[in-house]
Image (cartoon, rainbow, N blue to C red):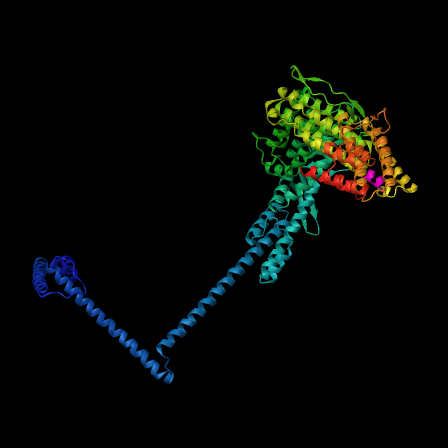
């Protein structure tokens, strides 16, 4: 049968294509020959199917009878189901047509009503079940609180605490909740919370408060810390009664008190307060006071252990660090044995408060002060480091140190093991302190003469290093002493380990940076006015810049490799030079402003034929010369020769340039005014030439030619031009004398027009000047 079913899957299109031997076109009609071939093939196919069906029936007739019987049964079941459906449909049709006539409810309506009623009954049943569960929970919780209260009144504090813990878990209260509700919780309760649960929480909080208060009384009786008498007394058992609460405890072990406090969540707070008092009154004074005495009395027959302390006024037999650690270990051993009954968990609660403060106190008062200041002191510090590590290990094993790791240690071991770093930091700070004290307390008005040596010797004993000699100038003792601090620091760095050497090298750099940071602020008023201190600061900057250039070559061979990789002082040279140049430029600017203000009094040297105007102009030039003379007196003995000549030359050049510009600005110069101008310029050049000490003794009309005053020759030649005729002026221009002195063609033409009237000779002179200037 399966083979027949498989054979029944017949595709006519594929059959036609197979019969004709090629693909067919869906839209093209078949020919007569194609149709005959197809009919023959179909007849053959039908014969094959009939033969196969006959063989199947003859081979397995039982299977065929079974299939027929099953088909007949299925047909009967379908007929019966159809009858049932027709009866239901008929009933529904009758209900729709008749309604509820005669009190008969239609079938479908009755079904819907029953369904709704069943749903309501189930919902009411679920609500009642929830109400019953809630009532059972409330009753159970309330009974738990009442049982805790009963146990409390009987004095069974441990059992009362256990029951309260169970109730707290049932109410899902936080472990640290004691009955205080914040605003957010109150809003939640008012917004839809169950009031019964709120009342249960209040009942629990009331019972918890009573139990906690009574336990606090027991603890206070068992652990008596008398600050005035400097004594801590601990009882192993204690009794207490409270008439208001109706509780009477004849005798309870301290361990039970602590355990119950731990159950209800108040032990950590109580121990934290106790630990804070113990640290302030007992532990910290042992660290700070060398003569602090402690007397320990172990548990006696009355079940009492006492520790007392006293600060000694005598400074003899000063306690060392090892003795201090031993005394602290005795105190912690006493507390662990008598107060915490050898409970490691409770010891950790105590250490959570004490240990951070203790490490800070020991570090600040012992370890940091004991950090060596010299290399020779390292051996003694290593002994202290060993004692510190043993002390910390003992406390860690006792449970006082939270998260203790014996292989890694904690803060005290880390500090003491890193002694080289602390030593280096301490040395660096001392270098900074010396430099800061020097720079803040020095008087920058005093100065010394700098005589730089030709050579310096390397710190590693190498050959002399050639040092370019700086010019002699005046510097402040502060600059010399600062460089002495830098040199001494680098010499120490050459003898130390790499860690220490690096810190000392950085300290030397910081000392130089301090000068750049402190000095400008300290002498600010002198830098903003014309003062000798500003020039001394300029010299200091160039002296330091000159010195730092050779620090690398002097100390580099003897320094550790890690310092050699990063060592550099050359970067300070441009920094200090730039600072020094800024100081000198600002001084020169202030002086030039003063000179220009003085020359402004001459009113442009106009109308000199009037005696009053001539005297005013002459006085102005005289005042300018006085200003220059005061500058020369102040600067010449302080500045290096080359710097002084260049700077002072610029000041004189500013005055000379102003005089030249004033004369060349005239549009018309009369004969008498020209004579007065020439006389005034001669007096100016004569007085200013004395500032350089180069006045010529051969003639009163010729003066020296200062090399650093670029406009000096121009002023001298301008003075001569005021007394020359047209032809000599033309010849001087053609010979190149006037251009070499700095005159331009426009300046000479303007001066000729101002001095001489318009004549053919002047026209010829101007033409020559123009033609010569265009070539």
> Relative to 366, is 10 on the left or the right?
left
Of residues 531 and 691, the one nearer the viewer is: 691
Query: In the image, is residue 458 above or below residue 519?
Result: above
> Relative to 43, is 448 on the left or the right?
right
Q: Position of residue 329 (x, y in %)?
A: 66, 29
- Say if residue 527 shows up in the picture: no
Of residues 209 and 385, the one nearer the viewer is: 385
Query: In the image, is residue 453 above or below residue 516?
Result: above
Q: Which residues are magenta?
A: 593-600
Question: Quick check: is 507 in the magenta stretch?
Answer: no
Q: Quadrant of the C terminus?
A: top right
Secondary structure mostly taken by the magenta-highlighted segment of the chain: helix
Q: Quadrant of the N terminus?
A: bottom left
Name the quadrant containing residue 652.
top right
Name the quadrant containing residue 64.
bottom left
Q: Position of residue 311 (x, y in %)?
A: 77, 30
| Residue at 27% from the left image edge and 76% from the top image edge | 86
Q: Position of residue 116 (x, y in %)?
A: 42, 72
Q: Position of residue 578 (x, y in %)?
A: 70, 33
- Say if residue 574 shows up in the picture: yes
Of residues 267 and 662, the one nearer the viewer is: 662
């Amino acid at each position: 049968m399966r083979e027949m079913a498989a054979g029944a899957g017949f595709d006519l299109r594929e059959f036609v294509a197979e019969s004709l031997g090629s693909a067919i076109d869906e839209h093209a009609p078949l020919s007569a020959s194609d149709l005959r071939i197809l009919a023959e093939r179909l007849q053959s196919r039908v014969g094959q199917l009939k033969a196969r069906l006959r063989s199947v029936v003859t081979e397995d007739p039982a299977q065929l009878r079974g299939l027929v019987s099953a088909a007949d049964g299925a047909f009967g079941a379908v007929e019966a189901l159809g009858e049932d459906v027709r009866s239901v449909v008929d009933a529904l049709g009758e209900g729709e047509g008749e309604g509820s006539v005669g009190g008969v409810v239609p079938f479908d309506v009755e079904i819907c009503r029953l369904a709704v009623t069943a749903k309501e009954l189930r919902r009411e049943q679920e609500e009642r079940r929830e109400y019953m569960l809630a009532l059972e929970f409330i009753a159970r919780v309330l009974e738990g609180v009442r049982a805790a209260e009963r146990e409390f009144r009987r004095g069974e504090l441990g059992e009362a605490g256990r029951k309260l813990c169970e109730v707290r878990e049932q109410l899902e209260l936080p472990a640290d909740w004691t009955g205080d509700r914040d605003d957010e919780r109150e809003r939640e309760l008012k917004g839809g919370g169950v009031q019964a649960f709120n009342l249960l929480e209040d009942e629990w909080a009331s019972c918890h408060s009573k139990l906690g208060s009574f336990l606090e009384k027991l603890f206070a009786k068992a652990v008596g810390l008398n600050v005035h008498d400097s004594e801590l007394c601990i009882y192993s058992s204690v009794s207490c009664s409270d008439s208001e609460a109706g509780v009477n405890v004849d005798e309870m072990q301290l361990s039970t008190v602590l355990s119950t406090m731990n159950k209800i969540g108040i032990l950590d707070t109580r121990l934290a307060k106790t630990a804070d008092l113990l640290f302030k009154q007992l532990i910290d004074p042992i660290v700070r006071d060398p003569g602090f005495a402690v007397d320990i009395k172990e548990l006696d027959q009355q079940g009492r252990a006492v520790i007392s302390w006293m600060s000694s006024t005598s400074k003899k037999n000063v306690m060392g660090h090892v003795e201090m650690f031993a005394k602290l270990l005795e105190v912690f051993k006493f507390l662990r044995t008598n107060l915490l009954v050898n409970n490691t968990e409770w010891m950790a609660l105590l250490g959570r408060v004490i240990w951070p403060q203790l490490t800070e106190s020991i570090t600040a008062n012992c370890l940091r002060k004991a950090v060596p200041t010299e290399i020779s002191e390292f051996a003694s510090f290593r002994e202290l480091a060993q004692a510190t590590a043993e002390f910390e290990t003992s406390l860690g094993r006792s449970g006082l140190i939270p998260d203790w790791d014996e292989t890694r240690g904690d803060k005290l071991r880390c500090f003491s093991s890193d002694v080289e770093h602390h030593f280096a930091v301490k040395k660096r700070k001392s270098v900074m302190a010396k430099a800061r004290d020097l720079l803040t307390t020095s008087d920058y008005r005093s100065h010394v003469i700098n005589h730089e040596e030709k050579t310096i010797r390397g710190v590693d004993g190498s050959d002399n290093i050639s040092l370019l000699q700086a010019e002699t100038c005046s510097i402040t003792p502060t600059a010399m002493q600062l460089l002495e601090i830098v040199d001494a620091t680098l010499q120490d760095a050459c003898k130390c380990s790499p860690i220490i050497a690096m810190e000392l090298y950085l300290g030397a750099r910081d000392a130089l940076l301090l000068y750049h940071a402190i000095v400008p602020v300290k002498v600010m008023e002198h830098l903003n006015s014309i003062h000798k201190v500003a020039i001394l600061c300029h010299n200091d900057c160039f002296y330091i810049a000159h010195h730092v250039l050779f620090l690398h070559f002097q100390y580099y061979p003897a320094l550790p490799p890690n310092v050699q990789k990063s060592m550099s002082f050359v970067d300070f040279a441009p920094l200090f030079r730039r600072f020094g140049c800024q100081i000198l430029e600002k001084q020169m600017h202030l002086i030039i402003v003063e000179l220009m203000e003085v020359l402004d009094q001459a009113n442009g040297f106009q109308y000199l034929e009037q005696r009053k105007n001539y005297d005013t102009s002459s006085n102005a030039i005289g005042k300018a010369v006085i200003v220059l003379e005061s500058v020369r007196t102040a600067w010449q003995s302080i500045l290096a020769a080359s710097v002084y000549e260049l700077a002072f030359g610029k000041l004189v050049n500013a005055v000379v340039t102003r005089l030249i510009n004033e004369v060349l600005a005239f549009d018309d110069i009369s004969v008498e005014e020209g004579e007065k101008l020439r006389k005034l310029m001669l007096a100016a050049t004569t007085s200013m030439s004395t500032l350089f000490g180069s006045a010529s003794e051969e003639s009163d009309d010729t003066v020296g030619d200062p090399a650093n005053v670029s406009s000096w020759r121009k002023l001298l030649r301008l003075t001569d031009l005021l007394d020359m005729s047209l032809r000599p002026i033309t010849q001087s221009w053609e010979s190149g004398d006037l251009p070499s002195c700095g005159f331009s063609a426009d300046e000479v033409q303007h001066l000729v027009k101002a001095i001489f009237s318009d004549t053919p000779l002047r026209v010829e002179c101007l033409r020559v000047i123009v033609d010569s200037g265009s070539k």
